[in-house]
Image (cartoon, rainbow, N blue to C red):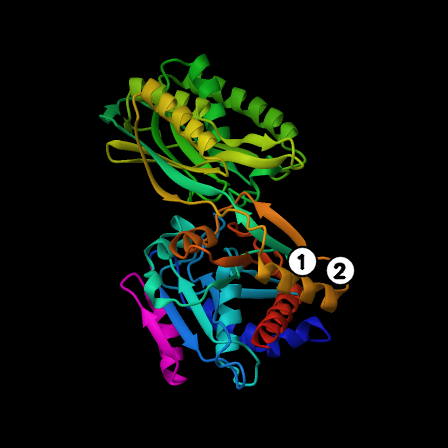
C-alpha cells in the first residue's frame, strides 16, 4: 500500500479507475465500456464472453502451481447511477466523469462519481493485467443494468461460468462483509389524463431543493427527506386551502433506487390574490420544514417563483386532486424493522420518480424486503392507494434476496485474512440493499458468496466520494485472499 494519498495515483487500480471514468456508462448504455473490456481481453489473449446486452466475462488461468485450484468468480457491475446537481451541465451519454482528488477522497465535479461500482471494475482489470500475482483460475464477471433492477445478472447465461465461489465487489464499507441482502421489485403507477388550457392562469413554480438524497436501500433508515413526498405535502396543503388549484407540470427524482433530492411543479391559481396567499403559505411551510429537517437535511429549501402569466396547460382539476392525494398518501421510507436484530430494516419503499408527460402521469417506487410476506403487504398498500385515486399499477423487475449461509468457506478466508492483516475482526452483516449475489445464488445453487468493497460515501448522489486508503486496503485484502485460495 502507498505511504501517502498521492501515491495511489501511480497504482494500477487508480489508473484503471481513471480510464473507465472517461467512458460513459449509464445503465442500459454499457456498449462503450463493454467494447473497452473485450478489447482489453483480446490484447492480453484472455478468453472472454460477451452477450447481447453487454455483460462481459473474462477468464484468466490460475497462476503457476494453482492452475487446477477451484476457480473463483470476481464480480461487479459496469453501469453507474447518473445524478448531477441542478447547476451542473453534463451529458452522461456522451461524456465521462471529471474526477477531483481532495486528500484522502476522490469525488466528481458536480456529478455522481461512479465508484459504485467502478471500483470493482478497476480491481478486476488490475488483477487480470498482472501476471505476477498468485491466484486460482479466475472468472471476472462484469454485469450491466444493475442500477435499474439487476437486469444484467438476471440475464447472464450461467453455463459460461464454472466457479462455485463468488466474491462480489459491490459491498462496503471497508471492514464489513455482506453475507445476506433483501430482495426487491419496482412498482409503476400510471394515470391517463386529458390536458386542457387554463385561460388567464396565475401560476407558481414550486421546487424542493438541497436534500441529501442517498441510496434507497442502505440510506433509507437515516430518515432523510424525500423531495417527492415533501412536494406532495406542500401541494396538499395548497389544495386544501385552494380547492380550485390545478397542476400544470410535475417532475421529481431521476432513479427509483435513489432517494430523490429535487422535485418541482407548476401550480395554477384562478386569481392573483390566491397566488399571493399561496406564496405566503409556502414561506411559512419552508420555515416549518427547514426546522424539521435541520439535522438530516440542513440545506433544504423551497424555491417559489412566478411562472409566465399566460394560458397554461393543466392536467385538470380532477386529475390534480388524484395526483396530490396519491403523492401525500403513498407509503415511503422504512415500513418494518426487526426488534431482534438491532432495529435492522426488514421492509421499505422509496418513492423515487414522478413525472407528467403528454397525457400521462407516471410514478415509480422501489420496494425492498427480506421477508416475502411483508413485500406482499407493501404491494397491497401501493395497489390500494393507486385504486383509490384512479392509477393503474404494474409490478416488475423483481430480484430475489440472498439467504445467509451458516457454513461459508469464503467468509472464513476473508475473516482470517482481515484479522491477520489489520489486527481487527471483520464485521459480518446483512443489508437492506439489493445485491447481485441473490441472482447468482439462484442460478448456481450451492454457490458460496460474499460481498465486500471500500468505503464510499453518499453514493447515488453528486456528493459521492471514495476513501482512497480503503480503496487500496480492500485491494490488498482481495489479493491476500486470492493467494490463500490458490494454495
- Crowding at mark 1 (Cα within 10 Å: few <14, some 14-19, many 20+): many
From the top left corner, tell me how far across and down residue 452 is, in percent: 58, 59
> Quadrant of residue 146 in the image?
bottom left
Magenta region: 29-54
Identify the residue at horizontal 60%, vertical 69% (top origin): 478
Of marks 2 and 1, the one in the foreground: 2
Which sits in the foreground, 117 or 440?
Answer: 440
Q: Which residue is mark 2?
A: 424
Q: Residue furthest right?
A: 423
Helix, strand or loop under label 2: loop
Helix, strand or loop under label 1: loop
Q: Which residue is mark 1?
A: 175
Is 281 positioned to the left or the right of 40 in the image?
A: right
Identify the residue at horizontal 58%, vertical 62% (top origin): 410
The tally of labels here is: 2
Which sits in the foreground, 247 or 21?
Answer: 21
Question: Which badge, 2 or 1, comes first in the chain's sequence?
Answer: 1
Amino acid at each position: 500500500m502507498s505511504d501517502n494519498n498521492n501515491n495511489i495515483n501511480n497504482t494500477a487500480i487508480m489508473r484503471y479507475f481513471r480510464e473507465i471514468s472517461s467512458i460513459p456508462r449509464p445503465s442500459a448504455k454499457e456498449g462503450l465500456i463493454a467494447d473497452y473490456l473485450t478489447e482489453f481481453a483480446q490484447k492480453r489473449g484472455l478468453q472472454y464472453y460477451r452477450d447481447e446486452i453487454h455483460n462481459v466475462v473474462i477468464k484468466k488461468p490460475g497462476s503457476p502451481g494453482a492452475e487446477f485450484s477451484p476457480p473463483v468468480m470476481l464480480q461487479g457491475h459496469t453501469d453507474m447511477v447518473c445524478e448531477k446537481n441542478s447547476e451542473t451541465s453534463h451529458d452522461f451519454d456522451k461524456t465521462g466523469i471529471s474526477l477531483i482528488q481532495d486528500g484522502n477522497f476522490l469525488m466528481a465535479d458536480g456529478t455522481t462519481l461512479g465508484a459504485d461500482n467502478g471500483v470493482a471494475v478497476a480491481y478486476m482489470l488490475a488483477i487480470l493485467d498482472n501476471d505476477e500475482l498468485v491466484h486460482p483460475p479466475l472468472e471476472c464477471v462484469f454485469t450491466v443494468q444493475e442500477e435499474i433492477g439487476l437486469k444484467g445478472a438476471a440475464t447472464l447465461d450461467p453455463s459460461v461460468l464454472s466457479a462455485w465461489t463468488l466474491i462480489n465487489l459491490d459491498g462496503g464499507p471497508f471492514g464489513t462483509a455482506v453475507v445476506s441482502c433483501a430482495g426487491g421489485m419496482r412498482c409503476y403507477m400510471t394515470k391517463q389524463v386529458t390536458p386542457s388550457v387554463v385561460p388567464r392562469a396565475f401560476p407558481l413554480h414550486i421546487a424542493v431543493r438541497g436534500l441529501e438524497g442517498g441510496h434507497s436501500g442502505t440510506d433509507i433508515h437515516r430518515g432523510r427527506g424525500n423531495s417527492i413526498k415533501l412536494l406532495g405535502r406542500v401541494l396538499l396543503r395548497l389544495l386544501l386551502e385552494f380547492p380550485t388549484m390545478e397542476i400544470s407540470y410535475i417532475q421529481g427524482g431521476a432513479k427509483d433506487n435513489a432517494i430523490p433530492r429535487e422535485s418541482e411543479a407548476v401550480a395554477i391559481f384562478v386569481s392573483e390574490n390566491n397566488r399571493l396567499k399561496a406564496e405566503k403559505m409556502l414561506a411559512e411551510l419552508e420555515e416549518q420544514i427547514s426546522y424539521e429537517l435541520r439535522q438530516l437535511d440542513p440545506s433544504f429549501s423551497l424555491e417559489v417563483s412566478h411562472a409566465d402569466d399566460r394560458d397554461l396547460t393543466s392536467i385538470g382539476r380532477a386529475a390534480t386532486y388524484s395526483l396530490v392525494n396519491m403523492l401525500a398518501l403513498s407509503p415511503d421510507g422504512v415500513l418494518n424493522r426487526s426488534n431482534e436484530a438491532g432495529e435492522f430494516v426488514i421492509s421499505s419503499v422509496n418513492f423515487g420518480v414522478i413525472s407528467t408527460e403528454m397525457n400521462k402521469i407516471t410514478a415509480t417506487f422501489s420496494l425492498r424486503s427480506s421477508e416475502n410476506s411483508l413485500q406482499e403487504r407493501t404491494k397491497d398498500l401501493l395497489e390500494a392507494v393507486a385504486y383509490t385515486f384512479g392509477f393503474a399499477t404494474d409490478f416488475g423487475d423483481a430480484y430475489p434476496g440472498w439467504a445467509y449461509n451458516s457454513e461459508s468457506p469464503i467468509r472464513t478466508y476473508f475473516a482470517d485474512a482481515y484479522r491477520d492483516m489489520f489486527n481487527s475482526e471483520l464485521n459480518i452483516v446483512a443489508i437492506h440493499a439489493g445485491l447481485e449475489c441473490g441472482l447468482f445464488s439462484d442460478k448456481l445453487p450451492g454457490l458460496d458468496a460474499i460481498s465486500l468493497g471500500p468505503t464510499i460515501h453518499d453514493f447515488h448522489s453528486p456528493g459521492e466520494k471514495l476513501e482512497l486508503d480503503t480503496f487500496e486496503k480492500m485491494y490488498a485484502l482481495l489479493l491476500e485472499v486470492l493467494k490463500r485460495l490458490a494454495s
